[in-house]
Amino acid sequence: MIDRLVVFGATADLSARYLLPGLAALQAAGHLGDRFRLVGADRGEADTAWFRGWAADQLDRHAFDVPAEARKAVVDRAEYRRADVTDPADVASAIAGESPVDEQQPVAVYLALPPMLFPAAVTSLHRAGLPPGSRIVLEKPFGEDLDGALELNRLLSELVPEEAVFRVDHFLAMSTVQNLLGSRLANRVLEPIWNSTQIAEIEIVWDETLALEGRAGYYDGVGALKDMLQNHLLQLLCLVAMEPPVSLDERDLRNRKVDVLRSVRPLTEDDVLHRTRRAHYTAGRIEGRDIPSYTAEDGVDPARRTETFAEVELELDSWRWSGTVFRLRSGKALGNDRKEVAVHFRPVPHLPLAEDEQAQPNLLRFGLDPEELTLHLTGTGTRARTLAPLILTARMEPPLLPAYGRLLLDVLTGNPALSIRGDEAEESWRILTPVLTAWSQDLVPLQEYPAGSDGP
């Protein structure tokens, strides 16, 4: 197990909200040894005392449910090093150990940086040199387009072996996502009907009431399509649609995921026009708060025409899924949070009841936040020979580790099963490149929707 984690971009929101709490959860669960050290690297002129104080404040705010002694242990093992990731000398200094023995020990390097800095950071790491056995972690999106992903993968291949590259997607570590696999593969009642003969449509949705919330510096250059659909939602598509793997080790699991991505029918220009939607929010109210128009948010450049809502309809050219529609959708500043995988079954072929009786097709919902499983059936109504909805709900047990705790544990122990392989990242960009091209040319109109509404 690697016992030294170097985080570039250590004082950014990602570290504050997710990485530090993830480490605290690992400490509380006994996964971090006494030799573990956290090195925070960033461009700011600061020192270890300041960084420890900042980290303690963030842990008090974002990991208050973790025991205080675990939070303190993470803080006490942290140090700060000023570094510009584009400067190989700074990078070499940040990853250097405190002794000659440490210099030879592998290190995990976490790039908690904007995606446009990945190529420069990887180049600096290559020039600085990494100890044998080191690992590198990158946040999504992996590249800014297909060409960028190909070039980034080339740079990474010159730095470390593929199995040492962790292109992390925290959705894959969510307990409900894990339960999606378990529900499919461990229950005979589901797997025989998990196909296009029985399933008409599968929605993969991440709608949120959250607006921009001061993230214009990142979001306005990315948008909903790259921020959510290209990575998170396509990964969920893989788990929903893949064939049962021989095992859940990294090779078998990731091979089956790539098979799904390769089976996605290429979108023509006409498909993009009729099977995709994009929009951004205008001024409105959410939960009693006034929300300004997206283009009026601080840091937003209206000329970019960035979308805050994206929807894409896909089909798979495979034996199992031919004829089933997969709808991927994500939007910000909507009236209600809806974060789920919704499986819509086809209606029954014959209903031996009165002509005016209608049975709604069955619906199976995997709730992502909150984490719950809901099955919508049709049962008997209060009157004779009548129908009524019947809803069964199961709330998931709280996970032992938060999603980022699970991802960090996989990085430190060297288990890449839940990370994205290089060819997965490339196939994901291939699928959405026609959409990016058409949207950049304004072939699909940029619609508007009031903040707090149901969307366009």
Image: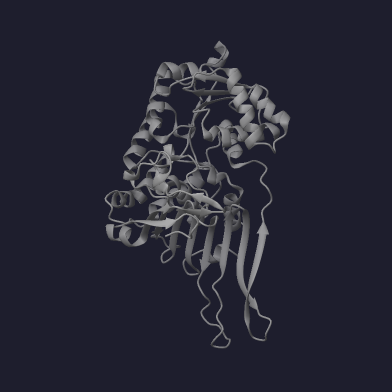
Residue under the image location 43 percent in, 34 percent down: 114
301 or 425: which is nearer to us? 301
Q: Is residue 300 left or right of residue 68?
A: left
Residue under the image location 28 percent in, 61 percent down: 270
To which quarter of the image does residue 170 belong? Answer: top right
Residue 62 picture location, percent across and down? 63, 37
To which quarter of the image does residue 355 belong? Answer: bottom right
Residue 96 picture location, percent across and down? 51, 16
To which quarter of the image does residue 323 belong? Answer: bottom left
Figure check: 386 above or below 372: below
292 or 353: which is nearer to us? 292
Residue under the image location 68 percent in, 23 percent down: 34
Quadrant holding the C terminus? bottom left
Residue 226 picture location, percent across and down? 40, 46
Residue occupying the far top of the picture: 100
Figure check: 136 above or below 215: above
